[in-house]
Amino acid sequence: MRQRHILFGAAVAAFLAAAPVPAFAQSADEWSMPRTVWGHPDLQGYWTSSTYTPLQRPESLGDQAFLSEEELAAANEILTAEGVDPLRARSYLAGATEEERLERTQQTQENIHYDNSIWLRENQPRRLAMRRTSLIVDPPNGRIPPLIPSAREREALRRAESRWLTTNISPQSFDSHETRTLQERCLVWRHEGPPMLPPSYNDLMQILQTEHYVVVMQEMRENDARIIPLDGRPHLPGSMREWSGDSRGRWEGDTLVVESINFNDKVHFNGSSTGLHVVERFTRVDDENIRYEFTVTDPTTWVQPWSVEYPLMKREGPLYEYACHEGNYDARHILEVARNLDKAAAAAADGEGSR
């Protein structure tokens, strides 16, 4: 495995030189903010959140908030090589040793349904988009704050019922379509937001602007594009709850600030309640990057608010239509397979009992 990565080193080094990691460091003398005809910063275009940087800092990194430039270059040499599995490599930084990190870039026999290294590879291979060791910038430890006691009880109940989950739990339940995940049922993706997180793949988004609205349209989404009013209108009444909450935007200097509330009781971002309050910030920092930040607050869930920051990087379009699984046929097929497995297990048990 080590020899394989050495063979790709020269080619990858050339790629790294041609595609530097965004640093948010262009000086005002070198760059001026592009603006719309009505004077707002121009955020329009196609952008990607592609990065292997984990949401939470791996415990093995302790208090290390940043990689050195040398560590970043070495990691990206490995992560952009051919044959890397973009799904498994998401946990690359969590490896405690070099050997373990390399192992985390390879697809295993247990999780193959197609060759991830081919079908999920992008024209510009995914990499660590910044030196930070986590997307979380506050608290300083780069970890999601602890749940308060009542939130732990609420989360345990959700898991026991195995309903309205965004990700699978173990053991999985195949009793009904309602015990399958929201993502599997094509209702909402965890990364869609608000707040938005980098997805595993299909990470392109398009931003459109008018004087009174901003539209954020993600490639892999189950809901309509987010149409964010900027005209100062109040939020919807608290009785009106949405999968993506209710968003209102405003400009603070050259930063677009978007506040979202009124999430329904079926969406729980990392354990949140319907009291989730999200504040997002979009700041264009140069021709190629938007600094995206968010802070989530929910006193009925976490002991304190927490914040994330990462770059949205310029890409060429177009944005292709995403269909999840068309017609929801997969839900039926999943349950049919589960019932057949139940029958096979029952028949095997009867056979053992008759001996």
Image: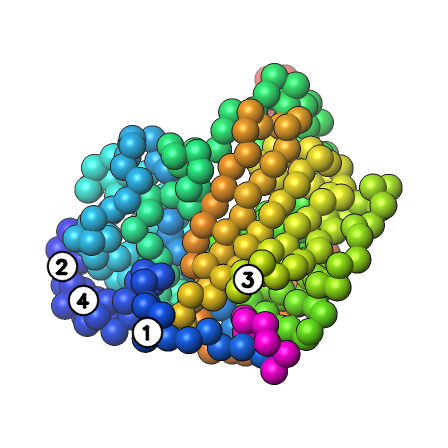
Q: Say what secondary structure mark 2 lies in.
A: helix
In the foreground, 33 or 327:
33
Q: Say what secondary structure mark 1 lies in.
A: loop
Please name the residue that numbered disc 2 is placed on. Answer: 6
Please name which of the two marks, 1 or 2, marks the residue nearer to the observer.
1
Please name the residue that numbered disc 4 is placed on. Answer: 13
| Part of the protein shown in magenta | 37-44
Q: Are marks 1 and 4 in contact (CB under 8 Å)?
A: no
Find residue 209 and report its image quarter. bottom right
The C terminus is located in which quarter? top right
Q: Which mark is residue 29?
A: 1
x and y, in percent, of residue 101 in the image: 26, 43
Q: Main secondary structure of the magenta part?
A: loop
Q: Are marks 3 and 1 in contact (CB under 8 Å)?
A: no
Find residue 261 and report its image quarter. top right
Do we see residue 15 in this rendering?
A: yes
Mark 2 vs 3, N-terminal side: 2
Q: Residue at x 42, y 46 (%)?
A: 135
Distance between mark 2 and mark 3 Cα atoms: 47 Å
Packing grade of label 3 (10 A; few <14, some 14-19, many >=20) is few
Q: Say what secondary structure mark 4 lies in.
A: helix
Distance between mark 4 and mark 3 Cα atoms: 39 Å
Mark 1 vs 4, N-terminal side: 4
Do we see residue 177 in this rendering?
A: no
Please name which of the two marks, 4 or 3, marks the residue nearer to the observer.
3
